[in-house]
Amino acid sequence: MNMKLHRIISYALAPRRGIKPMINEAHIVKTLILLYTHGPFGRQTLSKILGAGESSIRTLIRRLKELDLVDVSKAGGAYLTKTGEAVVETLLKKIVPPKTIDISDLEYLKLSRKACAMILKGFCKKYPNVLRIRDSLIRHGAEAALIICVKGGKLVLLSPQGNGIDETTIKELNILKTKLNIELRNEDLILISYADTSDKCETSLYKFIVSEGIV
């Protein structure tokens, strides 16, 4: 039976002897995805990629191992077990993980120094609650956010009022679509998170999908 991500996160973040690990939801989800797509990794490498202390990564790997999601080899480092792979495969059926987008040549849609995009597959079938999504992303560290649906092959920027503006009106949406460089399908929801660093905008997206129960 596939283990639920929220259970994994609760277990990994639980205090022990009154001490809470110096990691967050984003570290956990990103670690699982990294090990699935590029693993195995040693603790030092994961520490550098995630921007977390090596002792924190050691704690994270140990707890993921306790859940039978990860194993460790002396030669290669941490890698996913079959159970861990199944968890990530379920996740990737719902999302395309965050990626940093170069927004240096944008004007209207350049809302901060850095931007990251994440795709929620098919989540526009029901009109998204734009205010809730935006406020949640900001609460988790973003400075600004765009909520975009794919409709008829075009990007449509959604508004809280329940309408949208497509790329024929906002030309930079078409530029943004090119920068995403991934296959988009009708009803996909694109979340663009803005912050002063790539780490902050990426973290806000990971924390959003966890807090909203999307994964």
Image (cartoon, rainbow, N blue to C red):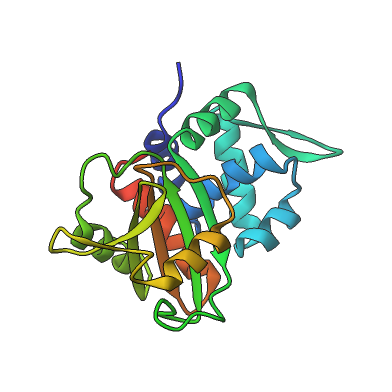
Residue found at x 50% / y 56%: 23
Q: Quadrant of residue 190?
A: bottom left
Residue that extends furthest to the top in the rendered view of this protein:
1
Residue that extends furthest to the left in the rendered view of this protein:
161
* Relative to 134, residue 36 above or below: above
Residue that extends furthest to the front in the rendered view of this protein:
168
- Report x, y in % for residue 70: 63, 33
In the displayed structure image, the side of residue 107 where residue 66 appears, left or right: right
**Residue 205 is at least partly visible in this image:** yes
- Report x, y in % for residue 121: 41, 40
Residue found at x 43% / y 66%: 173
| Image label count | 0
In the displayed structure image, the side of residue 132 where residue 173 appears, left or right: right
* Relative to 178, residue 215 above or below: above
- Report x, y in % for residue 213: 30, 41
Please tell me which residue lies in front, 3 or 93. 93
Residue found at x 60% / y 28%: 85
* Relative to 160, residue 154 above or below: above
For the C terminus, give its image quadrant: top left
Residue found at x 31% / y 49%: 211
- Report x, y in % for residue 37: 67, 41
Q: Quadrant of residue 144?
A: bottom left
For the N terminus, give its image quadrant: top left
* Relative to 63, residue 1 above or below: above
Please tell me which residue lies in front, 168 or 199. 168
In the displayed structure image, the side of residue 102 where residue 196 appears, left or right: left
**Residue 20 is at least partly visible in this image:** no
